[in-house]
Image: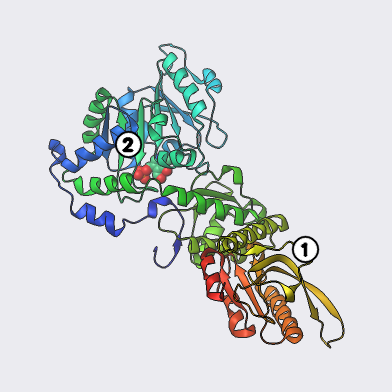
Amino acid sequence: MADQFIDMRSDTVTRPTAAMRSAMAAAEVGDDVFGEDPTVNELQRTVAAMLEKEQALFVPSGCMSNQLGLKAHTEMGDEVIMEQDAHMFNYETAAPSVMSAVQVKTIPGINGVFRAEELPPHIRPAQYYMPRTRVICIENTHNRAGGTVFPIDEIKKISEFCRKNGIMFHLDGARLWNASVATGIPVHEWAQYFDSVSVCFSKGLGAPVGSALCGTKEFITRAHKWRKVFGGGMRQAGILAAGALYAVQNNIPRLAEDHEKAKYLAEALAGIPSIRVDLANVQTNIILVDVERTGKTPQEFIALAKEKGLLISGGTFTKFRIVTHMDVSMEQVHRAATIVADRLCGAVANPIIRNAQEKRQLAEIKSWLETRGYRHLAIGEGTKFQTMPPGTFSFRLNVQVKLEGGVQSVNIPVDAVVMPKNAEAGDFPLMFEAKSAGDFTNTNKRRKEEAVKMAQLRSTYGDKVRFNLFLCGYFDSGYLGYEAAEGIDWVWEHRIDDLALFGL
Ligand SMILES: Cc1ncc(COP(=O)(O)O)c(C=O)c1O
């Protein structure tokens, strides 16, 4: 699947790397039901120490971890409070009622977040005919809300509320690592507010299997027993634990890359008028795209995207979900943006977003050139295209060209004009046109415009003119036909160092 498609359905689709596989292959193992697997024990010690909890218990899945948490905290007939979009409520197959015989009371949140002051009306008075409010659960980051971070100040208040009311506080921290990387707040600082914390190794961290439930020794002793009842007693589980151990030791800081990619992609998608992306909500690696205004359902989008080689998943009734992770490259992220924008939405980009992107591209070119000793000439300095000194550059410079027939002249603005350091008298500067995400639509029209520019430049200045494109990467092979057709060369923004190949 992943080889044929750009698979952005979830960060759970990541596959173990060669290094992780060799750590797994080399793992020392024993029978974990006897407590004798050294790698499992090492993982449990490591994770408990990271979260500053007394003990951790390795389990096969995030679902089991959450549900063991509930089982070990509750008695039959208790009530458990969670946000209405919680994974534990929506995607764990009614396990609280099946495995723990407890009742779930959901409360509404905004982007997965509710506040301590909203809780009192939901807490049951101590009456024999009412369930006992026993656990409050939160999710951080929140999957269905789009990877949003639960603010730590609010967590602190809810924790105090729980303590005051004798209620257990559980964290579904399947992506706590992402919350930590996004905020810079270490995992143990989040964990201190909870009686139990579940973390997953098989999401963004890239391990094939596994989660851990963490808490006090007494709590984990109970959860350990129930793990056996749930069928989670594993034997030589060290092979799996080694992948998880590798993941926590190596793959946490790199989550920042996933977050950057998500931000980049979200900004590109936010430029498409027919769909909606709430940029403030793109805090980690999940993007929710609202397609309500397109008249298509998320399921229709999912099917169309698949035909174009992109796998996305359902988010909510009107939204699809697209997730960045370690097996998706920046080039694939660019391609995903093109597929959604051009192929699925036939978009005409929002010019504000387009301008912001061009501005970013020019800032990148400026910094690249200045690092190499080039000097920026402001337009006001009387900069003229043909008389720029070697080692200088200018942006949005007007270049005069003759119109067809050769009599009338017009100015065409060129985004970046660079006179190479080794230019000789009479040489032309290099010209670059920044092509941003906003340009990804109507490829034929764009191509025609560029071809006309090139023809005008050549008929005015001759064949030595070098006119190139600085492509943001949303372009597919349609654009790259340029070189063959009009002699227009290009540089990818994500490979800006290729500017050196132009003699800069
Ligand atoms: C927030 C959250 N909690 C729990 C889980 C369950 O994890 P698993 O699939 O390992 O059971 C997931 C899975 O995606 C999740 O997103």
Question: Residue 375 in the image: x percent, y percent?
Answer: 65, 63
Residue neighbourhood size for the residue with mark 2, other residues' Cα within 10 Å, grouped as few (<14), some (14–19), many (≥20): many
Q: Nearer the viewer, residue 454 or 30?
A: 454
Q: In this view of the protein, can residue 98 be seen by the observer? A: no
In this rendering, is residue 294 above or below 209? below
Q: Which residue is mark 1?
A: 381
At horizontal 58% and vertical 69% (from top left) the residue drawn is 475
Question: Residue 89 in the image: x percent, y percent?
Answer: 44, 36
- All told, the count of numbered labels is 2
Mark 2 lies on a secondary structure that is helix
Q: Is residue 413 left or right of residue 316?
A: right
> Which residue type carries mark 1?
Glu
> Which residue type carries mark 2?
Ser
Q: Nearer the viewer, residue 246 or 222?
A: 246
Cβ atoms at labels 1 and 2 below 8 Å apart: no
Q: Which mark is residue 65?
A: 2
Question: Residue 168 in the image: x percent, y percent?
Answer: 38, 22
User: Quarter containing ligand 1?
Assistant: top left
In the rendered image, which quarter contains the N terminus?
A: bottom left
Queried on whether the Cβ of the residue with tag 1 lies below 8 angstroms from ligand 1, the answer reads: no
Q: Is residue 211 left or right of residue 171?
A: left
At horizontal 26% and vertical 28% (from top left) the residue drawn is 220
Queried on whether the Cβ of the residue with tag 2 lies below 8 angstroms from ligand 1, the answer reads: yes
Residue furthest top in the image? 127
Q: Is residue 382 left or right of residue 336?
A: right
First along the sequence among labels 1 and 2: 2
In the rendered image, which quarter contains the C terminus?
A: bottom right
At horizontal 60% and vertical 68% (from top left) the residue drawn is 471
